[in-house]
Amino acid sequence: MFGLKPEIKVFTEVKAGNALISKGPVIISKGEQPGYLKFSRALKKSVEFQVTSVDWEENATRSAGKAAAGAVVGGLLTGGIGLVAGAAIGGRKRDNSTAVLTLLDGGQEHKLFLKLKGADLENLQRLLYETDTRL
């Protein structure tokens, strides 16, 4: 019949960790209490922390070199229209945005830098602030 919708989880990478969570891939899910997040890693026990703030550092870049290479290849293969398409595909934006979470552990704050895209940030905020976090 109709099952429950799955819980939201954010699959991301820790760009710069701290004493609590090291650099590398991580799965973030809703904590047991509002304002808490659970961090899980393969073959390791999950840990949960209160998040006191979330800051967003947007950083998207385009590669001029890749755009030029794409334009040359596209132009050689299909002519003028390929030149434009190749440049567009080769030079598409690369999202290097970072979310900076402040975690509270035993009264001490720790910063955690996560590689996130816009949709992941929205899901992260839903995990923190909404009671129903099902897809």
Image (spheres, grey):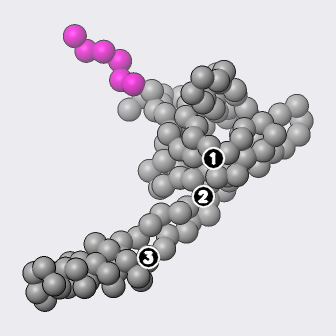
Of 45 and 129, the residue lying toward us? 45
Position in image of residue 43 (x %, y %): 60, 23
Residue 6's label in the rendered image is: none
Position in image of residue 123 (x %, y %): 49, 42
Which region shows up in magenta?
Answer: 1-6
Position in image of residue 56 (x %, y %): 61, 59
Of 9 and 13, the residue lying toward us? 13
**Residue linked to disc 3:** 62
User: In the picture provided, is 106 more to the left or to the right than 27?
Assistant: right
Q: Tag 2: Cα neighbours inside 10 Å, few (<14), some, or many (≥20)?
A: many
Tell me if residue 46 comes above or below residue 51 in the rendering: above
> Does the CB distance between marks 2 and 1 fall below 8 Å?
no
Residue at x 60%, y 29% (from the top left corner) = 40
Position in image of residue 99 (x %, y %): 62, 54
Residue flagged by tag 1: what amino acid is it?
Answer: Val
Q: CA distance from mark 2 to mark 1?
A: 9 Å
> Does the CB distance between marks 1 and 3 fall below 8 Å?
no
**Residue linked to disc 2:** 98
State yes or no: residue 3 in magenta: yes
Q: CA distance from mark 2 to mark 3?
A: 17 Å
> Does residue 81 appear in this view?
no
Tell me if residue 85 comes above or below residue 124 in the rendering: below
What SS does tag 1 mark? strand
**Residue linked to disc 1:** 14
Disc nearer the start of the sequence (2/3):
3
Residue flagged by tag 2: what amino acid is it?
Answer: Thr
> What secondary structure characterizes most of the magenta part?
loop
Residue at the far left in the pictured view: 78
